[in-house]
Amino acid sequence: MYQPSSRKEADMRLDSQVLDLEMAVKDGILGGNCGVISTGFGLKKLDLKLMVEELESIDVPTVFICPISLEPMQDPVTLCTGQTYERSNIIKWFSLGHYTCPTTMQELWDDSVTPNKTLQQLIYSWFSQKYLAMKKRSEDVQGRVKEVLENLKKVKGQARVQALKELRQVVQAHGTALKTVVENGGIASISSLLGPFTTHAVGSEVIGILVNLNLDLNSKTDLLQPAKISLIVDILNEGSIETKINCTRLIGMLMEGNDFASQNVASLSLLVGLLRLVKDKKHQSGVLSGLILLKTVCSNESVRNSFVNVGAVPQLVELMPGLNNECLELVLCILELLSSIPEGRLALKDCPNTIPNVVKLLMKASENCTQLALSILWSICKFAPEECASLAVDAGLAAKLLLVIQSGYDPVLKQRSAELLKLCSLNYTDNIFISKCKLTRTIE
């Protein structure tokens, strides 16, 4: 839906234009030759409907907006009350049996509609100006992108950094720039700047550009070369927060649809760098990007042992309090993946806050979080029942499981809760376990 300009602003425009096309053009408000574009075969009149569609995101003067649809009018007509509407909208209003003015709700003494040609021409002229200006900017952007790409073949050092910085800013700001980069072989040209001797200043800008582009299979394969991946990981560990996020997103893009990429990409340096990124809660976008990539990397079973060995489990457990549901679900998913290997279960058992933090999440966040939390608790309680089951019950697990069983959750989830409840009861007499199940200490 269009965002109309304020009524005061619209009235000012209306007063200044006085709905007089000849005077408006003479005064330079609308400009000459509005709505006409030059082609190789002469002048071509622009289509208003096309212009309205392509300029959907801009603010439009209120006087151009139909009060019924809140969309720009293309065929405005005026009622006997003096109110103007889009023809198709007011005709539909009449067809529904209404014989009033939609804005004022006055009864109509005359149901005829009068084409408002002056307003129609003003609308056409206004959209033409904006459309031609947009096309001009687009052509300027495309020309500048081609210039910079050509320039990158010649310059080095700080001049190369500045050229890349300009290209990154243009690519981020203009959608047309992305297409121009791709069509002019820019991906291969920019990717070739990454290598073992590339400075981090150059590498950061290259990554900032590539992360905004749609990379094809050949481009991804090229970027997955060990030397280039190693550089990207180094920059992730040492760059600014924006650069870290860009590196994380780029590595994620390279791994999409490639089952073998995790083994090639997942170095200890990457895992450590991602852990640092997700622990920085001041930058939530960094936490989210890092967790998304960690989940992708840990989907490969061969990587999980390495991740456990760098101390990931206690760090992720300590990270959970205060996370939003989206990030929390990702952490639980990663921990569940790690609980599938013996080293991961041992690390979860040995972390003193695993059971208390995970138990708190039951019935507290989303159903998916509850399911993941139950899976983790089942793994570690099954792994060390005598030690972990009693700790879980003391943390309030029994009462929480009863709530899950009585909830409207998925039957499979309720069945798993019943099985975990039975496992936890094995270390207690019936009376003691029943007392542990009382809901007096339920969810804080």
Image (cartoon, rainbow, N blue to C red):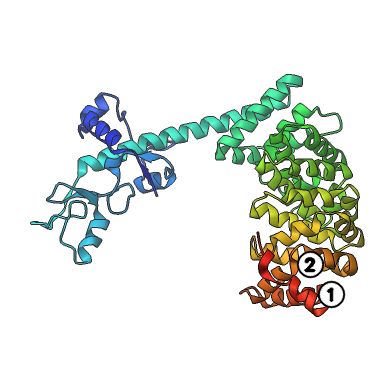
Q: In this view, does 50 lie to the left or right of 331?
A: left
Question: Foreground mark, 1 or 2?
Answer: 1
Cα separation between marks 1 and 2:
10 Å
**Residue 393 numbered tag:** 2
Q: Which residue is at the far left?
A: 109
Position of residue 135 relative to residue 417, above or below, is above
Image-quadrant location for residue 405: bottom right
Crowdedness near tag 2: few (<14), some (14–19) or many (≥20) residues, C-alpha within 10 Å: many
Residue for point 41% across, 40% down: 58
For label 1, the residue is 428
**Residue 118 numbered tag:** none
Position of residue 246 relative to residue 103, above or below, is above
Q: In this view, does 73 lie to the left or right of 59?
A: left
Q: Is residue 201 left or right of residue 111?
A: right
Q: Is mark 1 on a helix, strand or loop?
A: loop
Q: Is residue 91 left or right of residue 405?
A: left
Question: What type is the residue that disc 2 sits on?
Answer: Val
Percent position of residue 29, x then y: 29, 27
Q: Residue 238 or 398: which is nearer the viewer?
A: 398
Q: Residue 316 or 220: which is nearer the viewer?
A: 316
Q: What element carries label 2?
A: helix
**Badges 1 and 2: C-beta atoms under 8 Å apart?**
yes
Percent position of residue 80, x then y: 12, 51
Image-quadrant location for residue 389: bottom right
Percent position of residue 206, x then y: 72, 33
Mark closest to the chain's N terminus, 1 or 2:
2
Image-quadrant location for residue 242: top right
Q: Give the number of marks.
A: 2
Crowdedness near tag 1: few (<14), some (14–19) or many (≥20) residues, C-alpha within 10 Å: few
